[in-house]
Amino acid sequence: MLRRIISLLLLLGACQAVHYTPDWESLDSRPLPAWYDESKVGIFIHWGVFSVPSYGSEWFWYNWKTQQLPALSFFMQENYRPNFTYADFAPQFTAEFYDPNKWADIFNASGANYIVLVTKHHEGFTNWPSKYSFNWNAMDVGPNRDLVGDLATAIRKKTKLHFGVYHSLFEWYHPLFLQDQANGFKTQDFVKSKTMPELYELVTQYKPDIVWSDGDWMASDDYFMSKNFLAWLYNESPVKDTVVVNDRWGNNTRCKHGGFWNCEDHFDPGTLLPHKWENCMTVDKYSWGFRRNTKLQDIHTMDELIEQLARTVSCGGNLLVNVGPTKYGEIAPIYEERLRQMGQWLAMNGEAIYGTKPWTFQNDTTTAGVWYTAKKSAEGNVVYAILLQWPEGNVLKLGAPQPSTETKVTLIGYKGTPFTFQKGSGGGMVINIPTITFDQMPGQWGWVLKLEGLSNQATVAPRVQDLLQKMNG
Ligand SMILES: *[C@@H]1O[C@H](CO)[C@@H](O)[C@H](O)[C@H]1NC(C)=O
Ligand SMILES: *[C@@H]1O[C@H](CO)[C@@H](O)[C@H](O)[C@H]1NC(C)=O
Ligand SMILES: *[C@@H]1O[C@H](CO)[C@@H](O)[C@H](O)[C@H]1NC(C)=O
Ligand SMILES: *[C@@H]1O[C@H](CO)[C@@H](O)[C@H](O)[C@H]1NC(C)=O
């Protein structure tokens, strides 16, 4: 009898667990696991056979073969024997200095809370020993090593960061893909024998908390069988409770379906979106993969990075910052420096970023270059104003925050007294900026004012609350 009752209870429990069906209405109803929104910052890593030529971009193969960039044909003529093929680059993907523990240290020091490693780009080379990749994977040729597994292990051993994988649905030159394409995508031989088996293998083997899909534009979600994969991912996979995915699951899904939205690369709307989104962007302005001929002026400055971070988080996004390691497995010092500098900034100012929600206003209504975030704290609600420029003169006029008699204004990282202020004549507030000596300046790349006790301090405005509700499913 007791056993019967228990099995009945178990059955009831199982019935209550949400079961997702392979259609967007059901899949889109899954709430995004909270860790993702709270994290705010991730690191993207583009690494593959394209890291061998390290010239042009990670699209080297395609841009060379289709002669999109004549410079690439010239580069090949000048530097490689005739008949050298793209596949001939693979043995030179040596990764001899690849130390996943060192990478883990750098990513952790960046202040990021997750990473997304390219496991297979459009070239089709798998950075793990996939059962579905013959001789075009990192174990059989090149590194002779499981690049994905080794980083997953190091990240989990050394840090609390979430481990995520990037994966391209299609491959430029896979014969089965080309055949399906020639058949007008009425056949699915490539998807059934490559994309899908590979995705299931990646998830069961490495248990990623993010499946970051790409290569979506070539065919529909039906062709790629994405909805079935996602239903399995959400219902049955070993990461069903923690995993998040993006929106690139077919030529009809971007900015519409999936988990968080990436929309376009470098997506930076500058306004609040009614859905969780992510701005994936690059430290090298012109490439995701490493380029040996990158110039210093091609590298984003810290001011630019902090601006991207502030704009993105204020508008409800996460920032995914990309670096491209070298073929020999190093993260070049300029990228390491940017990541560590971002970490320095976050170590001081992280309370204005991590776990925040968008405020009523995303940026100020009077002064340009001031972006807001908000947070509930034990002492009350707090609004953070991130200043991208240090105020000129000795006052800062802000239009959005309305002060009360309780209002307190402090500069994060500054040991002096709180700043004084007056009510602005047409609303808002005028903050008096004291003279601060160089040794007392909290930093050099963007400063955060903590505004407590505002009369319009509510963490989020009703309009925003509405949007956030939609955003969280
Ligand atoms: C390049 O390939 C073509 C066709 O296979 C061959 O005829 C030619 O001899 C090759 N050239 C060299 C330099 O190997
Ligand atoms: C990771 O970074 C945090 C601060 O962001 C630090 O407290 C911690 O010691 C770091 N862990 C390692 C292993 O470096
Ligand atoms: C999406 O891909 C399908 C093939 O799967 C094709 O028939 C359709 O025209 C494409 N749609 C767009 C908007 O490109
Ligand atoms: C605030 O941001 C919006 C959208 O990015 C922009 O159009 C507007 O000019 C900004 N406001 C100020 C005062 O700079």
Image: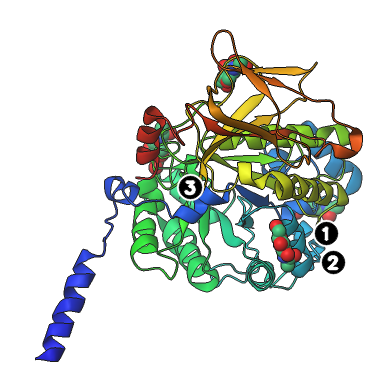
Query: Hey, which residue is sitting farthest left in the picture?
Result: 1
Return the mark for residue 330.
1
Left or right? Give the position of 83 relative to 431. Answer: right
Task: State which tag comes first along the sequence, 2 or 1.
Answer: 2
- Residue 89 found in image quarter: bottom right
In this rendering, does residue 156 appear at all?
yes
The answer to the question of whether label 3 and label 1 lie on touching residues, with beta carbons closer than 8 A, is: no
Q: Is residue 447 above or below residue 292?
A: above
Return the mark for residue 246.
3
Which residue was labeled with disc 2? 97
Task: State which tag comes first along the sequence, 3 or 1.
Answer: 3
The one nearer the camera, 62 or 129, is 129
Element under disc 3? loop
Query: Hey, which residue is sitting farthest top in the picture?
Result: 425
The one nearer the camera, 78 or 129, is 129
The amino acid beneath tag 1 is Glu
Q: Give the crowd class for mark 2: few <14, some 14-19, many >=20 residues within 10 Å.
A: few
The amino acid beneath tag 3 is Asn
Element under disc 2? loop
- Residue 393 found in image quarter: top right
Q: Is mark 2 within 8 Å of ligand 2?
A: no
